[in-house]
Amino acid sequence: MKRRIISAVLCLMLVFALTACGKDGNTQDTSEEKNEVTSVTGEVVKAEIPSGWCIVTSTEMTGASGADFICHAQKYEVGTAYLQVVPDSRDISAIKQVLESADPFGAYSGEVKLANGTWYIAENAAAAVIGGKSVMVKGYACDFGSDEVLLILGSLQWIE
């Protein structure tokens, strides 16, 4: 008798679990987590970064000023994926030629129009003119075609 009761209880639990996990084709999942975006300011740029990213200035990271690192982590640690944002004194056409050559930044992907201008994208770097100045963004373990990286690139602004 005990076995039958235990079996019946287990069957009911299984039915409830399957019912709770099942989805009707007409229902919408409203619990989808939205990726929050935060405005951050470094030494050279301002940016909008998704949750899970942070900004570290080059002074904080290396002791020398002149660049910002947008890291794919809550806090930078050695080995963390990052984007290094640096002003570049070269003309954008010269930077584009370097990106197109695939050396040293990997395969060239092409142009992408973002909110702050046209970006020239390679596998491990990107460049654009923002506010009249050329900017080079070099990446370490970042996908320059990802929505998150494109969001960051499209939001970059120089600090005045």
Image: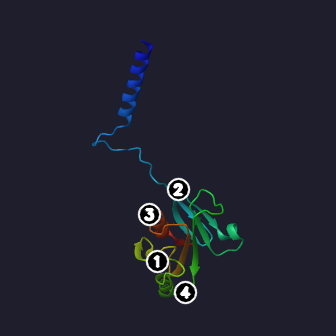
On the image, the x and y values in percent for residue 46 come to 55, 68
Q: Earlier in the sequence, mark 2 or mark 3?
A: 2
Q: Which one is nearer the viewer's eye here, 95 or 1?
A: 1
What residue does disc 4 label? 90
For the residues labelled 2 and 3, say whether their Cβ atoms are less than 8 Å apart.
no
On the image, the x and y values in percent for residue 160 come to 58, 74
> Of the residues tagged 3 and 4, which is closer to the observer?
3
Image mark count: 4
Q: Earlier in the sequence, mark 4 or mark 1?
A: 4
Disc 2 secondary structure class = loop
On the image, the x and y values in percent for residue 34 come to 44, 51
* Distance in Å between CA atoms under marks 4 and 1: 21 Å
> Of the residues tagged 2 and 1, which is closer to the observer?
1
Q: Which one is nearer the viewer's eye here, 61 or 37?
A: 61
Does residue 159 show up?
Answer: no
Disc 3 secondary structure class = helix
Q: Amino acid at mark 2?
A: Ser
Q: Residues within 10 Å of mark 1 (few under 14, many from 20)?
A: some
Q: Earlier in the sequence, mark 2 or mark 1?
A: 2
* Distance in Å between CA atoms under marks 3 and 4: 27 Å
Q: Which mark is residue 107?
A: 1
Residue found at x 30% / y 39%: 24
On the image, the x and y values in percent for residue 152 come to 49, 66
What residue does disc 2 label? 51
- Image quadrant of residue 23? top left
Q: Earlier in the sequence, mark 4 or mark 2?
A: 2
Q: Residues within 10 Å of mark 3 (few under 14, many from 20)?
A: few
Q: Which mark is residue 147?
A: 3
Q: Amino acid at mark 1?
A: Ala
Q: Which mark is residue 53?
A: none
Q: Amino acid at mark 3?
A: Asp
